[in-house]
Amino acid sequence: MDFATSSAGYAAPAPSGPTTSVKIVVAGGFGVGKTTFVGAVSEISPLTTEAVMTAASDGIDDLSKVPDKTTTTVAMDFGRVSLDRELILYLFGTPGQNRFWFMWDDLTRGAIGAVVLVDTRRLADCFAAIDYFEDAGLPYIIAVNCFDGVLSHEMDDVREALSVQADVPIVTCDARSRESTKLTLIRLVEHAMSRFAAMR
């Protein structure tokens, strides 16, 4: 199957053939932009399970870096995007808070890979997601969410801070941009395919 490359833009759709659908997980810390990411790229109205944050989260959810956040995902986000005529991605966004991690096994079951969204202001918030996918042996990439188009740190510094292996791709993205999120998903599919090919 011929996929577009992230460096050259989108390739022309391949000739019609059997359609393959795959599951992708979008993970990361609280308030990193997972719901925004899924909503930006989804071709359908995304299913979200956003709930209004209440006083019950005081002292539990750190809002210091996201003071305008008033809702939070309590189950999952769901969206769908076609990369070409032959490949459809079903996106499942995970909840970010520790108290909802019991759902992760169900959300990741059957996935071919994961995007771990990272906010460089709160790198420690994504450690648990990275550890989860490492332990599960699930291919993943790191996507640094550039707020307001600003990249605060060099990619090599981010890799070192996260202690991820050299073969784990690290890309930048804007979770609000359809084009940027689609390129991120293409990079994940490429990475997952190369991992699966190497295992044969």
Image: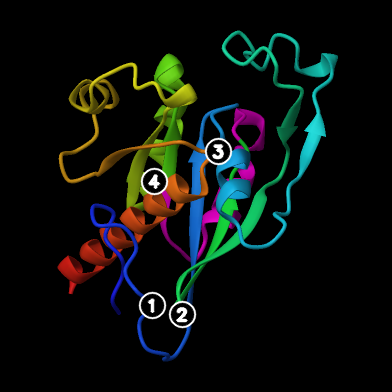
The amino acid pointed to by label 4 is: Phe
Asked whether 160 or 172 is in front, the reply is 172
Q: How many residues crowd mark 3 within 10 Å: few (<14), some (14–19), many (20+)?
A: many
Is the N terminus in the top left, top right, bottom left or bottom right quadrant?
Answer: bottom left
Which span of residues is magenta-colored? Answer: 96-114
Please name whichever residue, 62 or 173, is drawn nearer the observer in this view of the structure.
173
Mark 2 and mark 4 in contact (Cβ < 8 Å)? no
Q: Identify the mark nearer the N-term, 3 or 2.
A: 2
Q: Which residue is mark 1?
A: 13
> Which residue type does callout 1 highlight?
Pro
User: Tag on residue 85?
Assistant: 2
Label 4 or label 2, whichever comes before in sequence order: 2
Residue wearing tag 4 = 133
Whole-number angstrom distance, CA of label 3 to CA of label 1: 24 Å
The residue mark sitting in front, 3 or 4, is: 3
- Identify which amino acid the numbered label 3 is placed on: Arg
Q: CA distance from mark 2 to mark 1?
A: 6 Å
Would you say the residues marked 2 and 1 are in contact, meaning their CB atoms lie under 8 Å apart?
yes
Q: Which residue is most to the bottom?
A: 17
